[in-house]
């Protein structure tokens, strides 16, 4: 009798071992096959917006030298599965073929749009009488700092812009 009892215990132990082995192997296979599917559906939503790449806005040869020019351009923004096109602008000053500056088009006081006044040779903000020189420095008015610049590269005669760089702090913000 003791032998039969021991034999029954061995069979139950083997059954449990085989069941647990099959479940473990099946679970591993399901995890391996399921990971790409879960990642496809969930990852873009939690990943958020990707780092902004440089966007071509103009060619150096198209813009006059030492005359601020307002340039509009479109930027594609990918957020999860959604890709949108955003219309943006920048004030671009070409000093020579290799020296180009692009300014964010918003005043550093309250974010109003400013414009170039060729008669006074200044950027003027009509909201609160902010005045900036051609290099973006504050001449008068309430703006607390110079104009914000856009990260910029010149590649093969093309002007490429990236993130907005806040003046005097070197901090970047999405723009």
Image: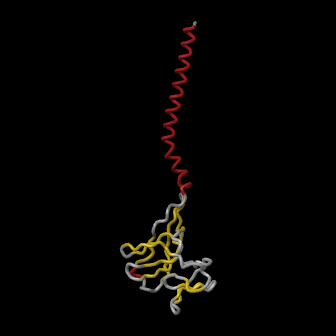
Residue 139 vs residue 157: left or right?
right
Quadrant housing residue 64: bottom left
Q: Which residue is drawn at 52% across and 82% down?
A: 137
| 28 over 153 or under it: above or below | above
Task: Determine whether 79 is above or below 113 in the image.
Answer: above
Q: The C terminus is located in which quarter?
A: bottom right
Give the image location of residue 156, x and y in percent. Answer: 36, 74
* Residue, far top: 1
Closer-to-camera residue (149/62): 149
Question: Residue 91 at x, y = what percent?
Answer: 50, 80
Identify the residue shown where x is 38% and y is 72%. 155
Residue 44 at x, y percent in the picture: 53, 55
Q: As displayed, is residue 80 above or below residue 156?
A: above
Residue found 45% across the figure and 70% down from its top: 55
Farthest residue toward the front?
168
Reply above or below: 9 against 55.
Answer: above
Whether residue 73 appears in this view of the structure is yes
* Residue 90 on image: x %, y %: 50, 77
Task: Identify the image quadrant of residue 131.
Answer: bottom right
Number of callouts:
0
In the rendered image, the residue lying farthest to the left is 156
Instruction: Give the image's coloring scheme.
Output: secondary structure
On-image quarter of the N terminus: top right
Any part of residue 164 in sight: no
* Pick the front one: 35 or 161: 161
């Amino acid at each position: 009798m003791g032998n039969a009892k021991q034999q029954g215990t061995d069979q139950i132990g083997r059954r449990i071992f085989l069941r647990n082995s099959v479940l473990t192997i099946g679970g591993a296979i399901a995890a391996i096959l399921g990971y790409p599917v879960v990642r496809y559906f969930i990852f873009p939503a939690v990943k958020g917006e990707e780092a902004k790449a440089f966007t071509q806005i103009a060619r150096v040869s198209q813009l006059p030298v030492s005359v601020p020019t307002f340039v509009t351009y479109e930027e594609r923004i990918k957020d999860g599965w959604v890709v949108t096109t955003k219309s943006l602008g920048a004030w671009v000053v070409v000093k020579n073929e290799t020296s180009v500056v692009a300014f964010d088009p918003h005043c550093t006081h309250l974010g109003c749009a400013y414009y170039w006044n060729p008669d006074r040779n200044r950027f003027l903000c009509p909201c609160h009488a902010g005045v900036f020189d051609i290099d973006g420095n504050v001449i008068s008015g309430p703006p607390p700092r110079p104009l914000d610049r856009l990260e910029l590269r010149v590649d093969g005669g093309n002007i490429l812009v990236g993130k907005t760089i806040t003046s005097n702090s070197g901090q970047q913000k999405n723009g």
